[in-house]
Image (cartoon, rainbow, N blue to C red):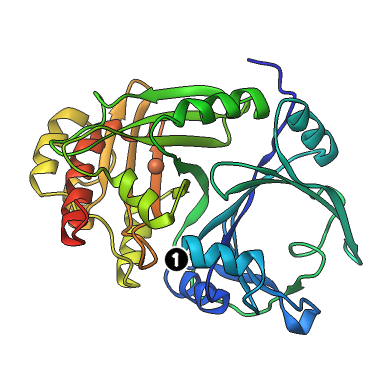
Amino acid sequence: MSQDFLPIKGYDHVEFYVGNAKQAAHFFDKTFGFRPLAKRGLETGSRDLASYVMEQGKVRFVFTSAYGPDSEVARHCALHGDGVKAIALEVPDARSAIREAKARGATVLKPTTAATDEHGELVTCEIKYAGDTIFRFVERKNYKGPFAPGYRAITAHGSPPVGLAAIDHIVTNVHLGEMNFWARWYEEVLGFKNLLSFTDKDISTEYSALMSKVMENGTGKCKFPINEPAEGKKKSQIDEYLDYYRGPGVQHIAMNTADICQTVRELRERDIDFLRVPDSYYDYQKDRVGQIAEEWNQLRELGILVDRDDDGYLLQIFTAPVQDRPTLFFEVIERHGSRGFGLGNFKALFVSIEHEQALRGNL
Ligand code: FE2
């Protein structure tokens, strides 16, 4: 293993900049079953921004919106629509993390800042990532509060959880020709390594193609695939994203569950839309994937996809975009040994994505 000059404990949170944080928080409560954990706003002395912290398992999402037109949050939303602003990683030592990252070429957007309240001290810093997206390092070993200084705990119950346990991976879309730049950036600046690479030979349909490199940190806990569009007959789904997000950004966040059938059944009952593959997919996959613990009929009924590699198999499903722009969506994944990303499903999936893209008039 390469020397870990930037040790990472895991994902800390993902912060979304949205037009209406109150409604976004409500949506993630009622549909995905996230529990309101903490908030900041006018009543806590935050005059410019309102933020809601939502939690399920180890997944923590923060939804932030602006009270006025002149903030970076408002500008971000006007340009990109609702989307991911910050990928926050928990580190044992934020000062060391930013020093190491900076020495290796990171653009520092916010130097190490210690915030304190009665619960202790939280140290954070931020570096630039693709487009307007940033990485945030969070050191919370001396902090015992619900989230961060300035936030007040919320005591609301929220809707029942759906079994989402942790973030599995976070995928970024970048422009044609930029994937290798960012793969190197992960290697050089963050000390990550390349776990897998997919070329347009692996991932292509009749119409469009994409290339992907998966980067992971030293412990393998944090995984970041990077997609770039490849030349195809028509506009690729990555190009569609880049057009509507107005640049590179987070395409999807995958979350683990220990029981994907139960999670998806629950999500479907709460009106979450998932991508559908044709029924013929299951006849074909049954032979390819072989023995699995789940009932094929149930997977077919729920639209869950299956893939197998040398290490085991995985079950996965993708939601439709969760905002009007065809940009961010979510993946639910259950791993049985496989460390892959469902390569065997890509083709069936992309045909399904392109069908939706055609309905939007964007293919
Ligand atoms: Fe994924």
Q: Where is 174 relative to 264, above or below?
A: above
Residue 353 image point, x, y percent: 23, 50
Left-right relation of 197 to 297: right
Q: What residue is rendered at 46% in x and 42% in y?
A: 171
Residue 163 image point, x, y percent: 46, 58
Q: Can you say which quadrant of the picture contains the N terminus?
A: top right
Amino acid under disc 1:
Phe
- Ligand 1 is found in the corner quadrant, namely top left
As drawn, the residue found furthest toward the bottom would be 43
Left-right relation of 251 to 122: left
Question: Crowding at label 1, few (<14), some or many (≥20) Cα neighbours within 10 Å?
Answer: many
Residue 207 image point, x, y percent: 16, 39
- Looking at the picture, tell me which residue is in the foreground, 358 or 143: 358
Q: What residue is rendered at 31% in x and 71% in y?
A: 269
Q: Is residue 188 visible?
A: yes
- Looking at the picture, tell me which residue is in the foreground, 235 or 274: 235
**Hey, which quadrant is residue 89 in on the image?**
top right
Q: Where is 356 relative to 109, above or below?
A: below
Residue 325 image point, x, y percent: 36, 63
As drawn, the residue found furthest toward the front would be 70
- Looking at the picture, tell me which residue is in the foreground, 352 or 265: 352
Secondary structure beneath label 1: loop
Q: What residue is rendered at 46% in x and 64% in y?
A: 81
Label 1 beta carbon less than 8 Å to ligand 1: no
What is the tally of numbered marks visible in this picture? 1
- Looking at the picture, tell me which residue is in the foreground, 87 or 258: 87
- Residue highlighted by disc 1: 32
Left-right relation of 343 to 173: left
Q: Is residue 257 visible?
A: no
**Hey, which quadrant is residue 101 in on the image?**
top right
**Hey, which quadrant is residue 148 in on the image?**
bottom right
Q: Where is 46 relative to 4, above or below?
A: below
